[in-house]
Image (spheres, rainbow, N blue to C red):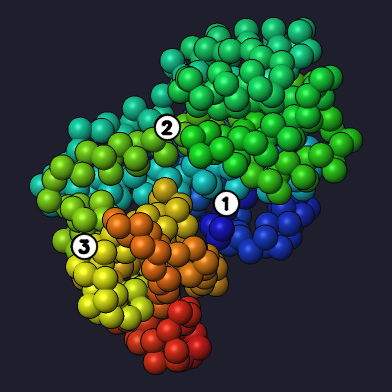
């Protein structure tokens, strides 16, 4: 996940330390030495994240945060306040100014990267929802969804899994004060049963449960069709690096350390609930468009008309912000033979099932469309070519490994070929599509049932 990060600190040593850590994760780093410069660079650079120190000359970090968050052009940029170890007042003032999260000095590497990734996922989802809103309006099918509603946390529901009575009470009181309702449970089966019946925005799970295994519960949630989209926040001992690493590897979204600090609790909870809200809003946007002229009636994917407008908007945005953008073009191998052998009704079922497997292999922020006949396209915002290749291979395998079942229960083995391209400087939607199409041709020419990316033939 590449991104532009603005580091704001007047101490050169601190800046260099953060810059080194962030560049190791392949982030693009920009620097400001005070609040005044931070406000200016936020407008000029439109960074994806701002790491803001509090104590600085000319203008401190709290005041700079307030200005950035009150400017319509920069208010969408997540800000992480960097505070001294016991600076609770800075955290309170940072929240009031609009900061999205905190890091405490000395900065822990796990905390730094986890906070950044968590807020980046939220921001990218917000960006994609805005882009789809623009596309829908251009097509005259602007949806009723109010994007700002996704930013609200009041009325959200959280399920807390913790058998520490005193801690659970403290967490519940803090979240209740922000308008978030909390249901408290103590064991796995009760958690899963309750979660299936309610619309929760977040799981908060202790890894120190007496009679249950918190990480095992996280694993069950991530493998549950209905629940896997709900973010998870774990509570872990600071010294327990093994549990923390294992949790993050299995897909846990963020973490809190024992003892839970109330301001950090609220900041982390807010970020995850907003992310879930935006994810739901993207789904609502799609459902709204189902009945309109932008959805392909056979596959329920977006149609060519919507795709042609949306890709122009995304290419324009990526070019102006310097973000990555990749495209996958694919089609079903030997589809004419399938139609001739099994009939057009079976062919339609195959197209529907391939579309379903495409959707299972991509993120909510990615846009899948039926391009025509048995041909599909997927746009992947904020995605490098190498990552798009991995997505393509995942989709290819999902089609090849499991036979597709037709209406008369016949099982048909089917494969797909895929071409992948990535946006370059001074690129156009037409050229991006043309290169993906050329790669698709190479995949078919090379024997089908394979992924071909443009680097192999166009560098």
Which one is in front, 308 or 402?
Answer: 402
- The numbered dot on residue 344 is none
Horizontal side of residue 346 vs 153, given as left or right = left
Q: Residues within 10 Å of mark 3 (few under 14, many from 20)?
A: few
| Residue drawn at point x = 22 percent, y = 78 percent | 340
Pick whichever of labels 1 and 2 is earlier in the sequence.
Answer: 1
Mark 1 lies on residue: 6
Q: To which quarter of the image does residue 351 belong?
A: bottom left
Residue 45: where, in percent of width, then height? 46, 56
Label 2 CA crowd tier, 10 Å (few <14, some 14–19, many 20+): many
Q: Which residue is mark 2?
A: 277
User: Residue 290 falls in which quadrant of the image?
Assistant: top left
Which label's residue is closer to the chain start, 2 or 3?
2
Q: Which marked residue is nearer to the observer: mark 1 or mark 3?
A: 3
Q: Which circle, 1 or 2, is nearer the viewer?
A: 2
Q: CA distance from mark 1 to mark 3?
A: 55 Å
Q: Secondary structure at mark 2?
A: helix
Residue 100 rendering spot, x and y as whole percentages = 55, 33
Q: Is residue 257 left or right of residue 296?
A: right
Q: Nearer the viewer, residue 176 or 251?
A: 251
Mark 2 and mark 3: span between their CA atoms?
A: 38 Å
Residue bearing the label numbered 3 = 345
Spot occupied by residue 450 in the image (x, y as percentages of width and height): 48, 80
Q: Note whether 339 is above or below 280 in the view shown.
A: below
Up the image or down, 410 lies above or below 297; here it is below
């Amino acid at each position: 996940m590449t991104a532009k990060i603005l580091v704001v600190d007047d101490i050169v040593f601190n800046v260099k330390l953060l810059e080194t850590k962030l560049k190791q994760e392949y982030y693009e780093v920009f620097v400001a030495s005070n609040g005044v410069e931070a406000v200016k660079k936020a407008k000029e650079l439109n960074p994806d994240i701002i790491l803001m120190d509090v104590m600085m000359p000319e203008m401190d970090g709290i005041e700079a945060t307030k200005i950035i968050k009150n400017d319509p052009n920069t208010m969408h940029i997540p800000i992480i306040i960097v505070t001294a170890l016991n600076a609770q007042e800075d955290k309170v003032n940072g929240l009031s100014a609009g900061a999205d999260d905190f890091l405490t000095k000395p900065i822990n590497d796990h905390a730094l990267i986890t906070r950044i990734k968590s807020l980046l996922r939220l921001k990218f989802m917000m960006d994609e929802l805005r882009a789809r809103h623009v596309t829908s309006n251009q097509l005259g099918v602007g949806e009723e969804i109010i994007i700002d509603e996704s930013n609200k946390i009041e009325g959200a529901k959280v399920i807390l899994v913790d058998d520490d009575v005193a801690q659970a009470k403290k967490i519940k009181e803090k979240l209740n004060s922000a308008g978030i309702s909390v249901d408290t449970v103590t064991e796995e089966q009760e958690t899963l049963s309750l979660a299936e019946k309610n619309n929760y925005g977040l799981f908060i799970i202790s890894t120190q449960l007496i009679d249950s295994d918190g990480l095992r519960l996280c694993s069950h949630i991530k493998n549950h069709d209905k629940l896997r989209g709900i973010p998870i926040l774990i509570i872990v001992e600071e010294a327990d690096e093994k549990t923390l690493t294992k949790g993050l590897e299995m897909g846990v979204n963020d973490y809190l350390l024992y003892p839970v600090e109330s301001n950090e609790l609220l900041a982390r909870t807010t970020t995850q609930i907003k992310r879930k809200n935006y994810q739901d809003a993207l789904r609502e946007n799609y459902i709204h468009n189902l009945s309109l002229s932008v959805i392909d009636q056979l596959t329920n994917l977006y149609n060519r008309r919507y795709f042609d407008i949306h890709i122009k908007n995304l290419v324009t945005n990526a070019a102006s912000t310097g973000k990555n953008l990749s495209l996958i073009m694919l089609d079903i191998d030997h589809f004419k033979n399938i139609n001739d052998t099994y009939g057009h009704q079976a062919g339609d079922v195959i197209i529907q099932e391939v579309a379903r497997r495409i959707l299972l292999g991509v993120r909510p922020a990615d846009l899948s469309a039926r391009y025509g006949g048995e041909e599909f396209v997927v746009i992947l915002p904020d995605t490098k070519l190498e990552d798009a290749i991995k997505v393509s291979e995942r989709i290819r395998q999902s089609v090849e490994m499991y036979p597709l079942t037709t209406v008369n229960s016949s099982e048909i083995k089917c494969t797909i070929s895929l071409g992948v391209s990535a946006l370059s400087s001074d690129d156009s939607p037409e050229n991006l599509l043309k290169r993906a199409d050329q790669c698709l041709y190479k995949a078919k020419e090379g024997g089908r049932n394979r992924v071909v990316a443009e680097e192999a033939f166009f560098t």
